[in-house]
Amino acid sequence: MKIDADAHDAIPVTLAAARAEFDAAVTYLDTATFGLPPRRSWAALQQALAQWRAGTADAVAYDLPLAAARSSYARLAGVDPSVVAVGSQVSVFAGLIAANLPGGSEVLTATGDFTSILFPFYAQSGRGIRVREVPLDRIADCVTSRTTLVAVSAVQSADGRVADLDALHAASRATGARVLLDTTQAVGWLPVDASRFAYTACGGYKWLLSPRGTAYFTINPTLIDDLTPHYAGWYAGEDRWSSIYG
Ligand SMILES: Cc1ncc(COP(=O)(O)O)c(C=O)c1O
């Protein structure tokens, strides 16, 4: 698989070039459910599948497209790639943040938000995590000094309502509450500055036009040392190909 981490910088983006990347058989208006693959992503995927099938896939070579995706996401989210984690699902990242909350924490959420950003917090009720659901349009006003975390989608999956991100950022600064922003229905079409929030999580298979099983997470660099990496695996090694064992 030959993918240059910075190759996309050289590709001129015009409407015609963008249109030529897509091959839908219908008039497609459902990117909020799943985005269609651009031609070059499709070609790269076919090449990877063919190599896998033929027994010629090179596990180390997977690092390059992964690093390229991480850098692209960092650019879209306005952060440095070093604060971007790659993963498979938003709910896993939300679960990581939920598991890191001190017992007794209050988590403020929006009524009717997507369950991947709600269930992980309800799942921690046995540790005394309390979820307080409020209407989306009042969420920033409802943040208090007793709020440990606000977990909310930038854009609602159910109906496209956009959260007031400036108000959320201001409320977080005023009270010290951290924000976990789900950017799944936003990044790709709505400019989002992830550096303004403690954590953000984004599924890749909608507006980022990727296959299922791709997700990104950003963390404010000052919070990295606070986070227990509950599901650290071999890919978390400092020099991953020499620290696989032991
Ligand atoms: C706002 C939002 N977050 C997350 C997801 C996907 O969640 P997960 O990655 O846990 O499957 C979706 C899918 O519809 C979504 O709309």
Image (cartoon, grey):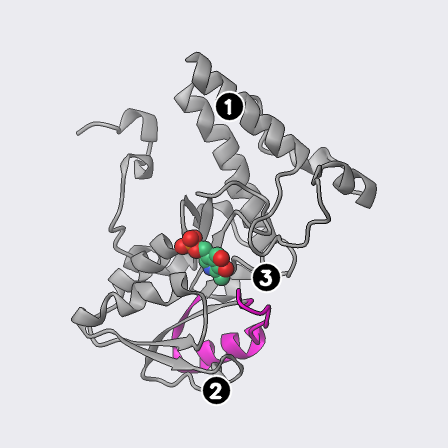
On residue 192, the disc is 3
On residue 48, the disc is 1
Which residue does the numbered mark 2 point to in the structure image? Answer: 141
Q: Amino acid at mark 2?
A: Asp
Q: Amino acid at mark 3?
A: Val
> Residue at (41%, 23%) from the top-left corner?
60
Tell me which numbered mark, 1 or 3, is placed earlier along the sequence: 1
Q: Position of residue 7 (x, y in %)?
A: 65, 31
- Which image quadrant is residue 126 in? bottom left
Q: Residues within 10 Å of mark 2 (few under 14, many from 20)?
A: few
Position of residue 198 relative to residue 234, above or below, is below
Q: Secondary structure at mark 3?
A: loop
Q: Is residue 4 magenta?
A: no
Q: What whole-number distance in Å separates the C-alpha atoms at marks 1 and 3?
A: 31 Å
Q: What whole-number distance in Å separates the C-alpha atoms at marks 2 and 1?
A: 48 Å
Task: Judge left or right: residue 42 versus residue 219.
Answer: right
Q: What whole-number distance in Å separates the C-alpha atoms at marks 2 and 3?
A: 21 Å
Q: Secondary structure at mark 2?
A: loop
> Residue at (82%, 41%) from the top-left corner?
16
Say which of marks 2 and 1 sits in front.
1
Q: Amino acid at mark 1?
A: Ala
Q: Is residue 156 magenta?
A: yes
Tell me which numbered mark, 2 or 3, is placed earlier along the sequence: 2
- Which image quadrant is residue 8 in? top right
Q: Are marks 1 and 3 in contact (CB under 8 Å)?
A: no
Which segment is the magenta one? 155-180
Tell me which numbered mark, 2 or 1, is placed earlier along the sequence: 1
Q: Secondary structure at mark 1?
A: helix
Position of residue 176 relative to residue 183, above or below, is below
> Residue at (57%, 76%) from the top-left corner?
164
